[in-house]
Image: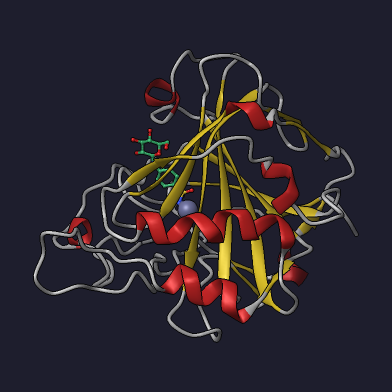
Amino acid sequence: ACSSKYVLSQVHPMWQGPLAVPGGDRQSPIDIVVRMSVFDSELKPLVNDYDPDTCQQIWNNGYSFLVEYDDTTDKSTLKGGPLQDKFRLCQFHFHWGESNAWGSEHTVDRRLFPAELHLVHWNADKYSLFEEAVMEDNGLAVIGVFLKVGKRHEGLQKLVDALPTIRHKDSVVEFNRFDPACLLPSNTDDYWTYHGSLTTPPLTESVTWIIMKQHIEVSHDQLAVFRSLLFTSAEEDVQKSMVNNFRVQQPLCGRTVRSSFS
Ligand code: BO1
Ligand code: ZN
């Protein structure tokens, strides 16, 4: 039998108490065991076509910070890779640790990274809203990119500079003209893909995960600014640092992880 844990972590009030998800044998995140992944020559290169003008705002939702995009038209899209349809970008966000020793949700051969970027897209060929797609098979596609500590990331710095203005939960500021493609590694042809779920509620099993093989480098100081954000709102007496906002790993339950490279 394949069981997965739903009651997770101390990081956020929404994780207190059990969370029932039907099925639960396709949950995320997972450890990618490289020698168990299966090369699939049918997996095509990813095609992202992002319009920086669709970038709208950045907000602290009490779990991460989200950079949100206007997804009412087909201006920022993702196609190709394992995807049959065209998907629209709605937001990206990160997960990170309190130290550089951990923080990513996915791991590669048990290797942890200090942070992980998620670019969230929904299937605009089959559905008309994120809320519709989130319930459905093949509804969502999320690109995962590992962050490693090294040299400062120029593209990320514009985001980092905005973070002090959204330190508390529920703060939102306008944020324009940010090209999410600047956060992708130089090689997006090499990736792993598998069927999984959202890693926070509603945890629906509607996600085609596309995990980049190549990581991006960011500086320790840039990650330190992520860690200066707060889980708590300005009204709360005891402030809690936003760190360790990742879900624990979930069982593979017989799923196959495919790779676009051999
Ligand atoms: S993740 O990429 O698996 N960590 C993930 C987890 C949860 C969401 C998105 C991605 N949640 C949803 C919310 C919706 C919201 C949407 C787009 O993100 O449930 O209410 O509209 O921002
Ligand atoms: Zn995420």
Residue at 61%, 54% (x, y): give it.
158
Asked if residue 192 shows in the view, the reply is yes
Residue at the (45%, 47%) spot, across then down:
66
Side of 198 relative to 23 (left or right)? right
Give how far across and how far down residue 213 sits, in percent.
77, 62
Q: Quadrant of residue 133?
A: top left
Residue in the picture at 73% in, 79% down: 150
161 or 115: nearer the eye? 161
Q: Nearer the viewer, residue 189 or 57?
A: 57
- The front one of 42 and 76 is 76
Q: Image quadrant for the N terminus?
A: bottom left
Q: Is residue 151 above or below residue 208?
A: below
Point 30% across, 66% down: residue: 230
* Vertical order, 202 against 107 (above or below): above
Q: Residue 141's spot in the image, x, y percent?
A: 59, 37
Measuring from the top left, give residue 169's x and y in whole percent: 26, 55
Q: Which one is in front, 108 or 181?
A: 181
> From what the image shows, is residue 25 above or below residue 225?
above
Colour scheme employed for the rendering of this structure? secondary structure
Q: Is residue 110 visible?
A: no
Q: Which quarter of the figure has residue 14?
A: bottom left
Q: Where is the C terminus found, in terms of image quarters?
A: bottom right
User: Seen in the image, is 260 located left or right of residue 166?
Assistant: right
- Total numbered circles: 0
**Image-based side of 249 in relation to 166, left or right:** right
Give residue 118's position: percent from left, percent from top: 56, 51
Give the left or right position of residue 155, taking residue 110 as reference.
right
